Amino acid sequence: MRHQSPVAALVTAAAVLLLAGATSAAAQESHIGNLTGHAASGKKLYRRYCVGCHGPDGDGNGENAQWIDPKPRDFTAGLFKCRSTPTGSLPTDQDLFNAMSRGFVTTNMPMWLPLAAQNRADLVAYIKTFSPRFATEKPGTPITIPPEPAVTIDGILRGRATFQKLECWKCHGPTGHGDGPSASTLTDSKDNPILPYNFAAGLPRFMCGATNQDVYRDFMTGLDGSPMPSFADQLQPAEAWDLVHFLRTLQPLDTPEALIWRQWVATHGSELKPIGPDNGGK
Amino acid sequence: MVRRFAFLRFSLLGFFILALAAPRAAAASGSTGGFAVAARGTSAAYANYEAAYAAAAHTNAAIPAFARKYGLACSACHTAWPELNAFGQAFRDRGYQLGNEKDSPIWQNPSYFPLTARMTPQWHRESANQQTVDVVPGDTASGTVQRTLTESGFDLSGMDLWMAGTLYKNISFVLLPSSDENAQWHFEAAFVRFDNIANNEWLNFKFGKFELDNLISEKRFLFLSGNGGSYLSYHYVPPGEASNDFGIGDNQIGMELSGHSENSYTRYGLAILSGTDGNPDIGEAPSYDADLTLSQAWDAGALGVQRLGLFAYLGQRPTYYETSGGAAIPGTGAGNKGFYRVGLAGDFFLGNNLEFMPFFMHAYDNAYLGTNTPSNVALPAGAQAPTWNGAFLESHYYVNPQLVFLGRYEAIRMSQQAVSGTPSDLGNQDALSLGARWYPIMFSRAGLAWDGEWSIVKTNTGGPAAWSNSVMIALDFDF
């Protein structure tokens, strides 16, 4: 057995300590653009704004959690729905910042945009201290979202076929009402019942944003902690965009996709086979 | 608050009453006490004394019903309740909605009821000098003398019963029956509001009785005591004037168009209001007032969100009425003359702990209003439009969300008296208020605050200055 010299041992120990310290320090800070958030400041803000739902330990067991559906996020698990990073990886600080600023539609998580950006950055830094993952792992690399192609009826129809093929309808329902055959059985990572997104509700926002890019990102990264998986391995970018355009037609809104879709259905609707288990084609 | 002063419009019309104005909001809801009533109208400083004796009067807007609905702690929307922070302001501007598509009452448990009750048991001490009393109590022939009167004791505030919430997505309401400490009720606020008209956050419409869109709200501020529990500037009436009892701090009746950016950093409000200072009777003034407010906030990094705003209130009041047997007939007001209040206000933070709220207002009343002269007769010699300036600086130091220290200095300065030759400083006022509020509980169901205040007001009377001061210790609870 080879013995390490005392000097080398000291250097190694110092390096380990420095690395650990640096990692820990990184977990105590957030970096959003040119903002640096500090966990110490965030702790005070967390007490003011967040503790009622997310709890003093960040485990989602705040005093009000028992009344909330869906339940508040458990920060200790280090699982976050809205990310720009691949499934299973940590979100970037910007992801957490965006989620906090935007809020989550159909939940109790409000839009904290009125808070000063520095405050939100501080809160991000503090939220990261709840999970040991942030002390030992780096965030994933954000996925690349290619430019959105023009909306065409052919693309929408391809997206519809993808919706059928990937069995999105099992949760979201054949018409996007969130009433698929599996919908009632879904649970999140903490075994709490969870409902799939109801496109037919006509909400102007999705869970992780309002734009087509946000929808694209949702199914290419998955919503970790929920039953919504990542389809990054099953979808090519073009297919993903087609699916985005089809999903827009499920909304009772006057989106460009919906207008094209309605026009086409008015003359070709009889050619469509219903989405579901018996669908065999178009 | 409003009705109590309505009598002035008629009984004092046309006369120059040398009684100084006072913080009427506090007086209106407050206790007067037996000997205070006996002294009514006998002293120029009496009004101040009456105000100083007022029990804490709050028609303030800290609404735990919202906290219960959304599960947010008081501190989420309030720097210290009832004062709103930037998030609370945005919530209010959206029509009491978070905007997460769960605001409609259909999402609520049917047992949920949007009701909030607020009251403030207290001990307070009130003292005022320059009070005209009989030399021998009960002997009106003994002459009068100026004395300092002081009283103290346990007391109650008035009570607010807030009902507020959404009727539907983007349709909300507020109903606020409010009583004085003797359970004399009135409607302090009652309105329906439509938000995001045509999916546009710049188009929101409110109809009913509501608070003016004051950047520094007196309905949501942190002082409660008789002297400190109102802004002098918001209720000031210049010496001798009785024709115009408008107060920019009083809730008004009318309609308001308002709008805001997504984060409510940019805001505007334009209101058309009955010229009745919030009195629900339509007959008191055949005129309409207008109120315009603009404010812009900006994110100053580590300093926090800063806000600066402008306001302009333009109004008219009648100067005479048709009479019957010499008595004014309600609803027949004529000879309207104008007045305005313009100014600016700010809400500035130095980090998350220190807040400064400066306010400045310039005020003008027409000479006919200032001298209580019917416009169908000539102005008395030397009559001119009274003008004055009001300003204050209020500061809060938030040790944490559950402890805040308060301070405020306010000054009123007459810049032109209604009658030339009147001492230029007659009616000038200075006020200093200090206090602290401690919230032993801070969660999403109810609120409790220990409130301690000291405040003092000096009023120039033309002779020795009149002083009044208040000490108050209270438990302010809100469920």
Image (cartoon, rainbow, N blue to C red):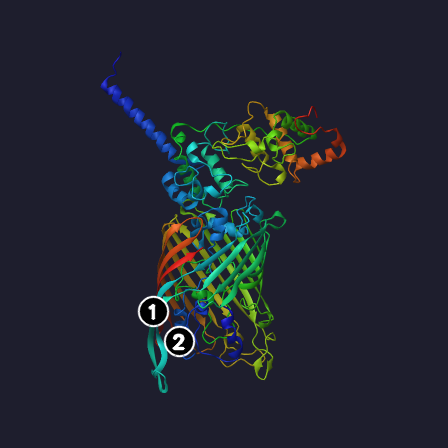
In the image shown, does B114 or A49 lie closer to the viewer? Answer: B114
Q: Residue at x 70, y 34 (%)?
A: A261
Residue on which disc 2 sits = B34
Q: Is residue B471 left or right of A78 when viewed as pictured?
A: left
**What is the chain identity of the residue bearing mark 2?**
B
User: Of helix, strand and loop, which one carries label 1?
Assistant: strand
In the image shown, does A125 or A169 lie closer to the viewer? Answer: A169
Q: Which mark is residue A77?
A: none
Outermost residue toward the left? Answer: A6
| Quadrant hosting residue B228 | bottom left
Outermost residue toward the top? Answer: A1
| Rendered view: A127 above or below A229 | below
Mark 2–mark 1 distance (CA, rounded to whole Å): 13 Å
In the image shown, does A133 or B256 lie closer to the viewer? Answer: A133
Say what amino acid the circle numbered 1 marks: Ser
**Residue A120, position as x, y percentages in the image:** 44, 41
Q: Residue at x 54, y 77 (%)?
A: B10
User: Of helix, strand and loop, which one carries label 2?
Assistant: helix
**Residue A264, position as x, y percentages in the image:** 73, 33
**Residue B133, position as x, y percentages in the image:** 36, 80
Say what amino acid the circle numbered 2 marks: Gly
Whether labels 2 and 1 share one chain: yes
Residue on which disc 1 sits = B152
| Quadrant hosting residue A119 | top left
**What is the chain identity of the residue bearing mark 1?**
B
